[in-house]
Image (cartoon, helix red, strand yellow):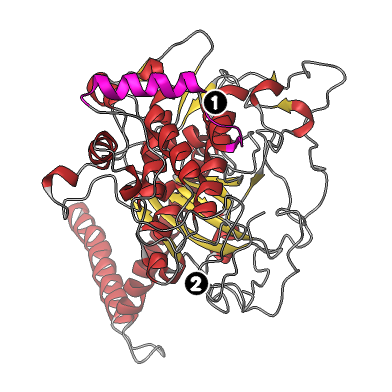
């Protein structure tokens, strides 16, 4: 009897379990009001959706956290405003009056250079360059400031496509008037990339005025109406940084009317750009050999004015600042010309500094074939006399109208320097004058120019004159000293050449008066050098 009770007692839970399972199963299979889906399907969908939502939330949180960390790291490594390293080599010096002709431009007799720390003037009576008020606020700091190109600005597109435009402030006599000065180098202006995009119509191809291995030069107009040339340096394995520093160090502080003025720069990320004054009358090469020569010819006096200005600028770089600057790429295409036919030397990307006490520096040979001094090409030893040689070649180029190297000519005329020496040796110096000149120079003018050029291209670098001497030789109305002519005769004779330049016009044409000047045939650009 006890065993029977026990059996009955244990059987009751089994029946209850079976009944409960059956009820649960029936409940899970009952249809719900959610699209008529069964309860177990609804529960499964809800659980899956919950898990998916949690996963998405985790992914979003991790993404945001990673972005914040990356942004902080980028901000620390690449600041918004990067200031290029400044050279400590260039010191503040007084201008040397004896080296400077009367029309050299020196601000308050003081030349400032790039320093990491502010410096005091050499003389308490001499003031530094006037600095613009750095607390001045920008007239319109909104990057969407409209940009409008003036119709009479040759070659610029009418309206920027970067932003819609209505008008802009008229150009001031001061190129950077109305613009902020963000520079921490003590000179010039720091431009944002957006500023220069607006100035160049988003770096439009229509605004390209020069290209080369170094980069591209665009013309543009700043928000205050100032026309500028913007050099965008290509970022090739650090070349952009090197060339940027070279040009900043070479001409960042110097001021001379025959040097193209560096107005400011742009440094953003890997972008390196330099902003120059815009010189809108072409360059010497285009006037002698390019498209401008097809419909207009420079007069003799215009050519000599351009060469004299170039000589004054080189004398300034070589003699008036410390350390002296060797341009290293003097050629006709790097001599820009303004509306008054004043020369402005440009492109300091290859320039080198020559400190006090150094007679030369050893460097890789760079420059333009036909203009490079032979001793520099052979040894890599560079000093200011290399620029003197290059200037002599440019002077011959202006006298003759010939390229330094012209393979379309007979073999004995390919090299301009060799051909010129041969013509002088054969007493045919009157025949070297550019036939495109409407009025030939006088015999005296031609002799002066040729003797100056021959001294500059002397194979012995030590015998070449300094550029301040070249200025006096070109600018003086006095005859070249007899001793100099005697030395030139000896030099030419030693090179199997004959007497110095004779004074007869072999063409039979009368010599033009020295002070006479005729305008070029260009109808749209009146020539009025002063």
**Dominant SS type (magenta):** helix
Q: Which residues are magenta?
A: 475-496
Question: Counting other residues with Cα less than 10 Å from the Cα at mark 2, is it few (<14), some (14-19), or many (20 or more)?
Answer: some
Label pair 2/1, CB-CB below 8 angstroms: no
Tell me where residue 365 appears, x and y as whole percent: 28, 28
With respect to residue 227, does 364 lie above or below? above
Tell which of 476 and 38 is nearer to you: 476
Q: From this viewpoint, which residue is outermost toward the right?
A: 125
Identify the residue shown where x is 45% and y is 68%.
296
Give the labeled residue for mark 2: 521
Question: Dividing the picture into quarters, in which one does residue 143 lie?
Answer: bottom right
What residue sits right under mark 1 in the picture? 469
Residue 96 in view of the camera: no
Sequence order check, earlier mark of 2 and 1: 1
Relative image position of residue 1 (x, y in whole percent): 19, 56
Name the quadrant containing residue 468: top right
143 horizontally vs 445: left or right: right
Residue drawn at point x = 30 percent, y = 40 percent: 368
369 on left or right of 89: left
Q: Is residue 331 above or below residue 21?
A: above
Pick the front one: 269 or 376: 376
């Amino acid at each position: 009897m006890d065993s029977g009770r026990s059996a009955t007692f244990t059987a009751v839970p089994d029946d209850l379990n079976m009944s409960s399972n059956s009820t649960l199963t029936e409940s899970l299979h009952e249809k719900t009001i959610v699209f008529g889906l069964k309860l177990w399907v609804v529960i499964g969908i809800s659980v899956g959706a919950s898990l998916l939502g949690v996963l998405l939330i985790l992914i979003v949180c991790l993404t945001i956290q990673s972005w914040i960390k990356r942004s902080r790291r980028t901000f620390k490594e690449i600041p918004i405003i990067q200031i290029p390293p400044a050279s400590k080599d260039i010191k503040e010096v007084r201008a040397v009056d004896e080296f400077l002709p009367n029309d050299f431009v020196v601000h308050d007799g003081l030349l400032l250079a790039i320093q990491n720390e502010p410096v005091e003037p050499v003389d308490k009576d001499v003031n530094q360059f006037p600095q613009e008020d750095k607390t001045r606020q920008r007239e319109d700091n909104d990057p969407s400031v409209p940009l409008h190109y003036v119709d009479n600005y040759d070659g610029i597109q009418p309206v920027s496509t970067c932003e819609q435009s209505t008008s802009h402030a008229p150009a001031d006599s001061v190129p950077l008037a109305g613009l902020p000065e963000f520079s921490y180098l003590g000179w010039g202006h720091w431009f944002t990339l957006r500023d220069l995009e607006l100035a160049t119509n988003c770096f439009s191809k229509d605004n390209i005025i020069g290209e080369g291995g170094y980069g591209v030069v665009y013309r543009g107009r700043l928000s205050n109406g100032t026309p500028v040339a913007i050099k965008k340096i290509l970022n090739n394995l650090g070349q952009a940084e090197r060339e940027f520093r070279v040009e900043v160090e070479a001409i960042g502080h110097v001021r001379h009317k025959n040097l193209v003025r560096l107005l400011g720069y742009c440094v953003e990320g890997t972008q390196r750009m330099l902003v120059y004054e815009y010189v809108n009358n072409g360059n010497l090469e285009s006037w002698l050999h390019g498209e401008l020569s097809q419909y207009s010819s420079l007069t003799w006096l215009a050519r000599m004015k351009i060469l004299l200005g170039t000589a004054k600028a080189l004398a300034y770089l070589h003699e008036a600042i410390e350390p002296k600057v060797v341009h290293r790429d003097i050629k006709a295409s790097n001599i820009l010309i303004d509306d008054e036919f004043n020369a402005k030397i440009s492109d300091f990307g290859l320039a080198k500094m020559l400190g006090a006490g150094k007679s030369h520096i050893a460097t890789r040979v760079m420059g333009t074939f036909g203009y490079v001094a032979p001793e520099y090409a052979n040894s890599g030893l560079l000093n200011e006399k290399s620029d003197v040689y290059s200037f002599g070649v440019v002077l011959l180029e202006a006298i003759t109208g010939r390229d330094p190297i012209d393979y379309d000519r007979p073999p004995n005329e390919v090299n301009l320097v060799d051909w010129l020496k041969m013509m002088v040796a054969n007493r045919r110096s009157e025949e070297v004058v550019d036939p495109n000149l409407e009025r030939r120079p006088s015999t005296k003018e031609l002799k002066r120019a040729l003797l100056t050029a021959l001294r500059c291209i002397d194979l012995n670098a030590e015998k070449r004159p300094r550029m301040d001497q070249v200025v006096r030789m070109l600018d003086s109305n006095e005859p070249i000293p007899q001793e100099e002519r005697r030395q030139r005769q000896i030099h030419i004779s030693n090179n199997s050449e004959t007497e110095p330049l004779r004074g007869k016009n072999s063409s039979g044409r009368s010599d033009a008066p020295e002070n006479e000047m005729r305008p070029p045939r260009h109808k749209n650009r009146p020539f009025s050098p002063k």
